Image (tube, grey):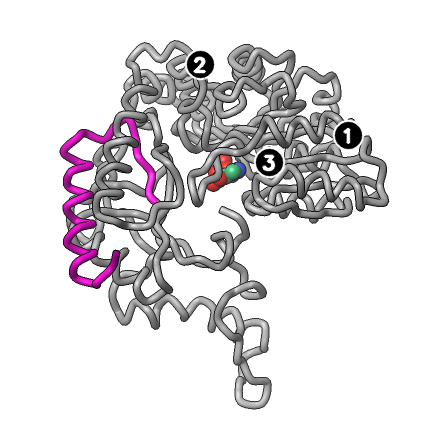
Amino acid sequence: MTEPATARSCPFPADADRETHSTPVLLARAEQFAAQFDRIAKGRENPLNIVIEDTTGPVQAVINGRPTLMFGTNSYLGLNFHPDCIAAAVAAAQHYGTGSTASRVAAGNHRLHVQLEEEIAAFHRRSDAVVFSTGFMANLGVITALARKEDAIFADAHCHASIFDACRLSGAQVSTFRHNDAADLERLFTESDIASEQTLVIVEGLYSVRGDVGALAELAAVAKRRGAVFVVDEAHGLGVYGRNGRGVGEHLGVEDDIDVVVGTFSKSVGVIGGYAVSNTAALRALRFMARPYLYTASLPLPVVAAARAAIALIASDRHGLRASVWRNARQFHAGVSRLGLPLHSDAGPVGSIRLPGLAAGYAVWQGLLARGIYVNLLVPPATPDGEVVLRFSVSAAHKPQHIDAAISAFREVKDSVGLG
Ligand SMILES: Cc1ncc(COP(=O)(O)O)c(C=O)c1O
């Protein structure tokens, strides 16, 4: 997701009026922003406020009293319900309690955190790993610890909001290059006043709105030739891409060109947390310089235990979950393609369908929900190029009949709102 939805960057006009509002302008503007979706929803479900009444499986929930198939979570492997992960979390909660209650540098650095770091480093075949409390914080930590105001950062225009927030926070001179465009990255180096060796290039392995793969080989080639640091966020590719599930870098055979890989435990791993891995000794500096590492509570040990179990499952792939998610992704993609809906990318664990505006987008989203299918309705600035999209994700935990049900619902809704 590119940018967070903020009142400042919201696509709707802020017509809060100083003269007539008794509330301060800042509050009125925020209220107005929040009210936009209510107006579109006209008393029906608000996509930003959906309440999951019950979770009955990795891809099953109850919403509005109705059993609902989830095609809008990032549980790509279904590991949030794997018995090994649940058992590990339960045992850790019973033994260690529920929370860490301290940051890594203040009594929150447990043996289990260190083991998780060793295991994630070994999984990625890197010498070192640093674990954070979320993937968002991992991006903040890596980017702000490495880049300062005298440096430059070149980011792909489709990068996640956490990357852009990290770039801003670093104080470095930030420029974006056109999505996946190595020539445009080259242009930034040529035009920059800052030495290319003082530049950090950041991209993603798998982009989470359109579901397309990063052009890592071409972009890494430019970054390496210029002597820049090349960082890849593998949040969505982890567990799904590459023979060993290490992500798009492995899939494309370019891991050696990536200086730092950032990842998250909130998607395939099925818990919460983030990490950075690298072969450079510089990674150690994160433990002293990364404020999102220093100044927030460390991961609770039940989460750490479940993450360790999940990483072991991803590494062994003993249930063939990678093959399952890909089989399901292809079935889903083929079904949606047959309906003639405009897909953004080839088959993959996450992707999106372009919709002609917010009203049509809401109608499709709400129609699917009424039929027991949950997907994400995304609007600018969370999407590139000002588009309204339905973002879907597919899991190894889906059954073929779940996907058939989703495609039938898409067909009915498409006909009822005149799409395609
Ligand atoms: C590319 C990317 N990076 C980082 C994150 C943040 O991950 P987390 O949920 O662990 O904070 C996300 C979450 O959606 C993401 O898509």
Looking at the image, can residue 320 be seen? yes
Report whether 311 appears left or right of 77. right
Label disc, if present, on residue 400 of the rendered structure:
none
Question: What are the residue bounds of the magenta stretch?
Answer: 392-420
Judged from the image, the secondary structure of the residue bearing numbered disc 1 is: loop
Q: Earlier in the sequence, mark 3 or mark 2?
A: 3
Question: The residue tagged with tag 3: helix, strand or loop?
Answer: strand
Of helix, strand and loop, which one carries label 2? loop
Asked if one can make out residue 295 in the rendered structure from this viewpoint, the answer is: no
Pair 1/3: label in front: 1
Q: What residue did someone put label 1 on?
A: 226
Q: Which residue is mark 3?
A: 203
Q: Is residue 104 above or below residue 352?
A: above
Picture quadrant where residue 34 is located: bottom left
Q: CA distance from mark 1 to mark 2?
A: 30 Å
The x, y position of residue 239, in whole percent, is 42, 22
Looking at the image, residue 183 sits to the left or right of residue 337; the answer is right
Q: Which residue is found at the position 36% from the left and 33% from the top?
A: 349
In the rendered image, the residue lying farthest to the bottom is: 19
Q: Amino acid at mark 3?
A: Val
- Would residue 419 be counted in the magenta stretch? yes
Mark 2 surroundings: few (<14), some (14-19) or many (≥20) residues within 10 A: some
Please name the amino acid that badge 2 sits on: Asn
